[in-house]
Each structure stands twice: as structure tokens, then as C-alpha cells.
Amino acid sequence: MTPLYSEHDRFIVNVNCVIIGLYNGRLSILLSRRKVEPEMGRWSLMGGFVRENEGLDEAAKRVLFDFTGLENVFMRQVHTFGAVNRNPGARVISVCYCALVNVDEHDYMRVRGHNASWVDMSDMPDLGFDHLDMVRRALAMVKCRFADEPIAFSLLPRFFTLTQLQQLYEIVLGEQIDKRNFRKRVAENPCIEKTELVDKTMSRRGAALYHYNDSLSNLSRFHM
Amino acid sequence: MTPLYSEHDRFIVNVNCVIIGLYNGRLSILLSRRKVEPEMGRWSLMGGFVRENEGLDEAAKRVLFDFTGLENVFMRQVHTFGAVNRNPGARVISVCYCALVNVDEHDYMRVRGHNASWVDMSDMPDLGFDHLDMVRRALAMVKCRFADEPIAFSLLPRFFTLTQLQQLYEIVLGEQIDKRNFRKRVAENPCIEKTELVDKTMSRRGAALYHYNDSLSNLSRFHM
DNA sequence: TCAAAAGTGTTCAGGGTACACCCATGG
DNA sequence: CCATGGGTGTACCCTGAACACTTTTGA
């Protein structure tokens, strides 16, 4: 290391992950009750301290894997929080990431092991530190991207009905959508392919199952 | 400090500022030639190390003031860069900010004193570290916001002509704009007020000077 | 008188929005 | 046979894009 750098202040840096999924058809976020001080007993985001030999993105992926067993999911850096007194225990700079996951694929044992659980977003408890700000920023990012990028499919199971897809858009965008207009737009998107499969859990008639296939798209997406 | 935190790795953290202004009517960025290793002699962004007693936003404001003498300008956090080997001299985590400034108001002596200068963006030199990524992300952010938020006025002098405003939009958005359509949109915005002043430097006829007055807007903007 | 920038309306097309009824099936 | 969610087409409006000429005045 160059001696010139030795004089500077050094900081503990961690990553926090806003992990969003559809749990029981409700937009939910993975939270854990803190087992240690500070803020012991309060809900908080999944987090972990950055290590000397890992980059920020790697740290975020490690935390996501540690808490869910998931890899290769949509994940974006949201914002870095560095107010002096944001953590009463020590000066900690937190880089916030947001991940969108398919809860069907996650490892529930890991969640249990970390004292974590899925919490309905419309029933958000108070969070420790500035984690509520993190959640707000993450949601704003998701809402903003939702209109442009095909990130909805990160939240849905591999096969989904158009009603599921529409309900997801309605929850995230916070507004009702006309069914026919929605399906018209879906029909114009070549990446959303209808399958022969039918879901009969929601209606007697049954609904066609679709899946998202981005191989027809020439846009490179999901790069971090 | 809680003993629990004592065991974690610590990092040097700095802020880098992508400071953008209109210099000689060209979209330009403030760059300085590094006087020290690593990357000595190469162009780089304005930066400074975060101190123990200051938050990230404060550090960014300090750097901006230090290099330009400006305060209370549009400034946003862009992204945090934390790859392990991004800085060959030491592990440094860099929080990138972007500021839009009115170059008429800046303190040129400070710029000179830091070996810095305004560089035309369409003639961008190679930059040290990952600073080119920072510039790209900052520009993407600016372009994205430009369509929604009235941030163009941060770059212009207090009084400006519609031609200046249009040229700025054309540069930032990277496309030609129809003059009549542009002026129609301007006319619909109550915050853009025509004054009795006339600028005769650009034409014999003279162009009306406008100024931006956001007191009529009920949106709260520019919050960091 | 001419060069150079300022200023000014109308037309058209396409996308987005609003809107209501029949279908299939299990119980 | 009925209750429940699935599935389908059209009309209208409004926003956004294209487009050319007159005005002013200093040199």
C-alpha cells in the first residue's frame, strides 16, 4: 500500500439488501429481528460487513446467498447511506442493494436460521437505523424500472398467469390497470410466451400459463 | 464504540464529484491532472477523502466547495464504486456524486489552484481509475432526470434565452428538437418567466431573456 | 440590402385510455 | 344452473411530431 494513503480515516462498511418477493401473493420483504445491539429486537434488513478481499457487489451477493440460498437474481445498488450518526453503535457506512427474488426458489431453512421472515410490504413495521429510508428508495427504484425493464418476471414463478402478472404491476405501480389494455400490451411483447399449461387453482375454467423468454430480445439487461 | 464492531475490516472511503457546467456554451466537466501517485499525470475527477466526523453528503459538498467555491447547487449521489482493485494504490471505496453548476458563479482561482480545468465532454480524455464509468453513470442520471425535473436551469445563467435552453436540451438528450414544439412546451411551463431584458450578443435582433422561478411550483425538488 | 438569429400555428397520426360482455367449468 | 375468474375488440381523444415563413436590425 502506498504510504500516502495511510493517513486517512477508515470506516466500517456494510451492505444492506432489500430483498423483495411475492409471498402468498403479497409483495413482501425479507426482514430479521436483530439479535444483537444496537437496535436489538427491532426489525432490520439483511446485511453483512464488507471484507477486505471482496468488492461491494460481491458482498451483496454473499449476503443474498447467505440469507436465501439464491444466486443470479436481479440485484441493483440503490444508494449509499453515510450520515455520521446513522448507527448508534459505531460509524458505519452502508451500501444498500435491492434484489427481486422468486420466493418459490429460496431456501427457507436459511431464512429461519437467521431469525428472518417475509413481511407484507403494506404492513411494514418500524425498522431500525435508517432502513426504512432504504426500503423507500429501493421501492422507488423498482417502481421506476418496472415501467421500462422486464423485471416483474424476477418476482414471479417460472410459469404465471396474466392475472398474476397484472396484479403484480398493480401492486408495484400502485394503480388499477384495465385488463384488456394490459393484455393487449402483453400480446405485443414477443418475450412473453403462452404455454399449453393451465393453472386451475384460481378458477374453475383455468388460466393459461405464460413464461418469460428474453432470448428473443436483443437488449442486454440485468447487468449490475 | 461497541466492542462488537471492533473486529470488522475498515476502509478508506472517498467521494468523487462529476461537476458539470456549460463552459463557452459547451457541456463541460471539471477535471484535474493528478499531481500524486497512483495515476499521476492523468486526468481525474475532483475528489476528497471522507473524514471521521462528516457524512457522505457533507464530504461531497466540501469537495465541491473546495474546488469551485459553490454551495447550494444541484447535487446527487450517483453510485458507489467498490471493486477490490479499482485503485492500484490502496483499497478505496468511492462514492460518486454529480453536481450541475453555473460556471459564471464559480471561483476560477480555486480551479486553477487545484490544477483543474473545464474539459469539453465531447472531447473527453482518458481518465484514471474507473472515473470514466463514474462520468457515464452521472451523465445517464442527468439525462434521465432532465426529462422530468427542471435541472437544466442549474447549468444556465440566471437569465437565459430560449435558444440557449434548447441547445442545452439538445446536447444533453443527444437529439435535435423542433424549435416551435420546444417553445410551445416552454410556454406551458409557468415557472419559466419571460423578462423585459434582451440579449443582443447573439443576434442583431436580440433575444428575450427568461428566468426560472420555481416558487410557483408545488413540487419539492432538489432534495438530496 | 442582406445576413443571421428570433419568433410564430396548424395539421396529422399513433398510442393510450375508456368501456361491457361472453366463456368455461366445478360444485 | 350458477358463481367465479378467464378471456376478448372498438371508438375516441389527446399528446407528440412534422413542417416554413416573417421579423428585426446592425453592418
Image (cartoon, coloured by chain):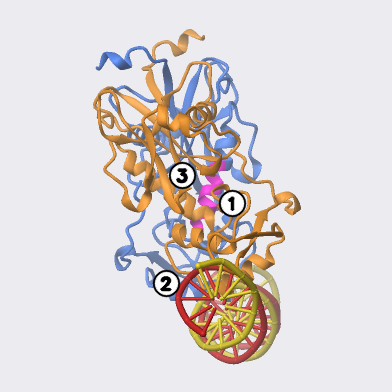
Chain colours: A orange, B blue, C yellow, D red
The span from disc 2 to disc 1 (Cα, nearest Å) is: 38 Å
- Comparing marks 2 and 1, which lies closer to the viewer? 1
- Residue shown at 55%/34% (left/top)? A70
- Main secondary structure along the magenta-highlighted residues: helix
Residue designated by label 2: B189
Q: Are marks 2 and 1 in contact (CB under 8 Å)?
A: no
Q: Position of residue B25 (x, y in %)?
A: 55, 53
Residue designated by label 1: A153
Residue designated by label 3: A20
User: Relative to residue B181, is residue A33 depicted above or below?
Assistant: above
Placement of the N terminus of chain B among the 4 image quadrants:
top left
Q: Position of residue B46 (x, y in %)?
A: 47, 31
Q: Position of residue A136 (x, y in %)?
A: 37, 48
Mark 1 nearby-residue class (10 Å; few <14, some 14–19, many ≥20): many
Host chain of mark 2: B
> Which element is circle 3 on?
strand
Looking at the rendered structure, the kind of residue marked 1 is: Phe
> Bounds of the magenta span?
B137-147
User: Relative to residue A212, is residue A101 depicted above or below?
Assistant: above
Q: Are marks 1 and 3 in contact (CB under 8 Å)?
A: no
Q: Earlier in the sequence, mark 1 or mark 3?
A: 3
